[in-house]
Image (cartoon, rainbow, N blue to C red):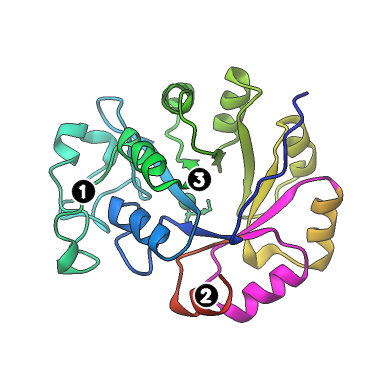
């Protein structure tokens, strides 16, 4: 089994969907802003379009973050890239688009950002998105950590590569998570911060896993989590987090 070095996340704050407090989530503007704010790691979500392109967006549907309704998976990338992915957040961002993964990878390199790419699963297409993401990141120098709520996706990653670093995502506890995180050789476990306490953090650390907590925008909770041993938090980068934690 490959032995991974520890993730180096400094400051220990990952821009959740970029600097999503300041710019529309999962857009180029949000990633550039994160870097400007002194952040070195960003998290973003990816999924497949109708034509098999990998795009950076969180919801499976378009209405919350663009100017149209419908499923991401029903649109081609040619169609998606024409949409306004910024006005919902603020009119000043009306020119922001849904980026494709290659565009964001180029930006990571240019901005010297590391990234956690969270793969959003589409049932039956797990192998397809995994292959595409792994192909795209194969020649990148940026530090990439992959994760997914889908164990199908996580297993598909490990089927193709034992070298890529992956983190197990846990939103609610499920039986066998310890065994699965070991079998998949996960370097980290990414948990909903509400699940975390002194005991379970200590348990994961004893397993040799780094513990990453999402989504933390409250300074008191961030400090408490760090004092309990959490290695890094995912944050929308609220002003308070930037001034008192970063
Ligand atoms: O990867 C951490 C976090 O992003 C998971 O939740 O729904 O914001 O993608 P979500
Ligand atoms: Mg995410």
Residue, disc 1: 97
Mark 1 or mark 2: which comes first in sequence? 1
Residue depicted at 84% across the width and 45% down the height: 207
Q: Taking 67 as reference, is 157 above or below it? A: above
Mark 3 or mark 2: which comes first in sequence? 3
Residue, disc 3: 114
**Mark 3 Cα-neighbour bin, 10 Å: few <14, some 14–19, many ≥20:** many
Residue, disc 2: 241
Q: Taking 198 as reference, is 136 above or below it? A: above
Q: Quadrant of residue 86?
A: bottom left
**Secondary structure state at the residue bearing disc 3:** strand
CA–CA distance in space, label 3 to label 1: 21 Å
Residue depicted at 75% across the width and 25% down the height: 2
Q: In which quadrant is the C terminus drawn? A: bottom right
Q: Quadrant of residue 145?
A: top right
CA–CA distance in space, label 3 to label 2: 19 Å
Residue depicted at 49% across the width and 73% down the height: 242
Q: Taking 125 as reference, is 242 above or below it? A: below
**How many discs mark residues in the rendered view?**
3
User: What are the residue bounds of the magenta stretch?
Assistant: 207-232
* 93 left or right of 18 in image: left
In the rendered structure, does residue 223 fall within the stretch colored magenta? yes
Between 107 and 231, the one nearer to me in the picture = 107
Where is residue 36 shown, x and y percent of the image?
38, 62
**Mark 1 Cα-neighbour bin, 10 Å: few <14, some 14–19, many ≥20:** many
Where is residue 228 shown, x and y percent of the image?
78, 68
CA–CA distance in space, label 1 to label 2: 27 Å
Residue depicted at 63% across the width and 81% down the height: 220
């Amino acid at each position: 089994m490959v032995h991974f070095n520890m993730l180096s996340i400094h400051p220990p704050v990952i821009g959740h969907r970029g600097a999503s407090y300041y710019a529309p989530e999962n857009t180029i503007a949000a990633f550039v802003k994160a870097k400007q704010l002194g952040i070195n790691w960003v998290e973003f979500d990816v999924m497949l379009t109708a034509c098999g392109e990998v795009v950076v967006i969180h919801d499976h549907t378009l209405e919350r973050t663009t100017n149209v309704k419908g499923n991401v998976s029903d649109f081609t990338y040619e169609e998606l890239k024409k949409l306004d992915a910024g006005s919902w957040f603020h009119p000043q961002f009306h020119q922001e688009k849904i980026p494709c993964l290659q565009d964001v990878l180029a930006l990571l390199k240019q901005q010297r950002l590391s990234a956690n790419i969270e793969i959003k699963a589409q049932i039956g297409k797990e192998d397809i998105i995994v292959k595409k993401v792994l192909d795209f990141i194969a020649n990148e120098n940026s530090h990439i950590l992959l994760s997914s709520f889908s164990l199908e996706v996580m297993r598909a990653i490990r089927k193709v590569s034992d070298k890529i670093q992956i983190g197990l995502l846990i939103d609610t506890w499920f039986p066998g998570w310890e065994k699965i995180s070991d079998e998949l050789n996960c370097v980290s476990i990414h948990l909903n911060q509400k699940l975390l306490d002194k005991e379970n953090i200590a348990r994961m650390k004893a397993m040799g896993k780094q513990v990453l907590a999402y989504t933390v925008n409250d300074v008191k909770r961030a400090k408490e989590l760090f004092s309990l041993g959490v290695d890094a938090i995912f944050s929308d980068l609220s002003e308070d987090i930037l001034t008192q934690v970063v």
